[in-house]
Amino acid sequence: MNILVTGSAGFIGANLVLRLLDEGLNGENVRIVGLDNLNDYYDPSLKEYRLNLIEKKIAEHPEHHYRFVKGDLADKTLIDNLFAEEQFDIVVNLAAQAGVRYSITNPDAYIQSNIIGFYNILEACRHSYDKEMVNGKSVNSKYAGVQHLVYASSSSVYGGNKKVPFSTDDRVDNPVSLYAATKKSNELLAHAYSKLYNIPSTGLRFFTVYGPAGRPDMAYFGFTNKLVKGETIKIFNYGNCRRDFTYVDDIVEGIIRVMQHAPEKVVGEDGLPVPPYKIYNIGGGQPENLLDFVTILQEELIRAGILPADYDFESHKELVPMQPGDVPVTYADSIALQRDFGFTPKITLREGLRRFAKWYKEYGLQTFEA
């Protein structure tokens, strides 16, 4: 089973690779190619840390194969060559320029990675079905092409939707950030390619992913860094925000289940292919008030010994207005995920933040307090 994981040094990508190296896929051994450009959107040392975890895991599981390629999705020649060399069965596209607020000041990065990069992946999937003919005979007839493209979308596509919980049946035509617009564009492009070229594709709308070795620009991580340094944390919309936090292991479990079940290729009444195309939410389905989230975080930081029991949190909190591009609530309707795959996220916010605090004590404290 040949698998491409883009963004393999990223938070979700690295955890997915680690899980695949531990268990394989559907009882089969795997050959994984991980692609990442190791950019400096946040401290690259964290990406190196994740890659080191993968290296250790490889040594534990020689039955699987892993190859890391440093490169960019926007490099069409690189992507085309990788697909030609490796003949991927499954492609999991997690590489993207992330972050809502960063997209306001650095739009070029989002167009390059999230639009051009994703287009390159779609084109490579499309041409994986091409058969090279020599003297009228196919020379790669044993390779059937990409059997499933799984790609990361985002809860950000729901924008300012008032209806909750957010369902994949809802219209999502009003993005409030460029990041959200690029993710919605990915879904539209994937649908078009699924229709035109019969590419089985599944988009996954992730809801506020968190956990150990996550992204430092996420609230739980950024808050911890500031509190350790004695700085003030800003709580937006005066604390009147609700987020559907989803622990990274639940995200990976969802991805693994989806990977193994590509949308079925069927022919419609008109004799033309029905796009083998699906979209799912992966979210906890239990949105937490931001002030409650901060309270749980501070309790777990004290429990882990990162902060003293008498830490004065009130003097380190500032309630401020909403930021541009943010939304007041995210709330996943994951009924379709449960229906089709028998899974909904299960790890509670307290349990997840406890695991994060334990990791931060062991790794992050010495790294991020300087």
Image: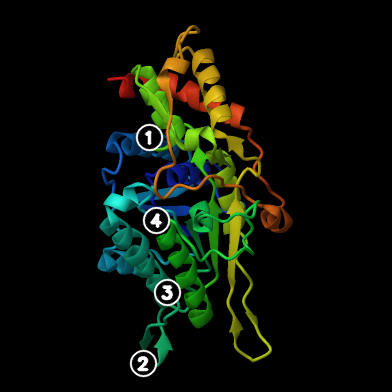
Q: Is residue 126 above or below residue 12?
A: below
Q: Is residue 212 above or below residue 151?
A: above
- Which of the marked residues, 1 or 2, is nearer the chain's N terminus? 2
Q: Secondary structure at mark 1?
A: loop
Q: Is residue 84 above or below residue 359?
A: below
Density class for disc 4 (Cα within 10 Å; few <14, some 14-19, many ≥20) is many
**Callouts 3 and 4 close, C-beta under 8 Å:** no
Q: Which mark is residue 363?
A: none
Residue at mark 4:
179
Q: Amino acid at mark 3?
A: Ser
Q: Residue reaching furthest top?
A: 310
Instruction: Name which residue lies at 59% across and 66% down.
Output: 278
Residue at mark 1:
216
Residue at mark 2:
135
- Kindly indicate the quadrant of the structure image that contains residue 123: bottom left
Depth-wise, is mark 3 or mark 1 nearer the camera? 1
Q: Secondary structure at mark 2?
A: loop
- Which of the marked residues, 4 or 1, is nearer the chain's N terminus? 4
Instruction: Residue 11: give x, y in percent of width and height.
Output: 43, 42
Residue at mark 3:
128
Instruction: Residue 66: give x, y in percent of width and height.
Output: 40, 49
Q: Amino acid at mark 1?
A: Pro
- Which of the marked residues, 3 or 2, is nearer the chain's N terminus? 3
Q: Secondary structure at mark 4?
A: helix
Instruction: Name which residue lies at 48% across and 6% down.
Output: 310
Instruction: Name which residue lies at 47% across and 63% down.
Output: 184
Q: Is residue 276 left or right of residue 117?
A: right
Which of 328 and 214 lies nearest the eye of the viewer? Answer: 328
**How far apart are the two marked residues, 3 and 2, measured between alpha carbons?**
20 Å
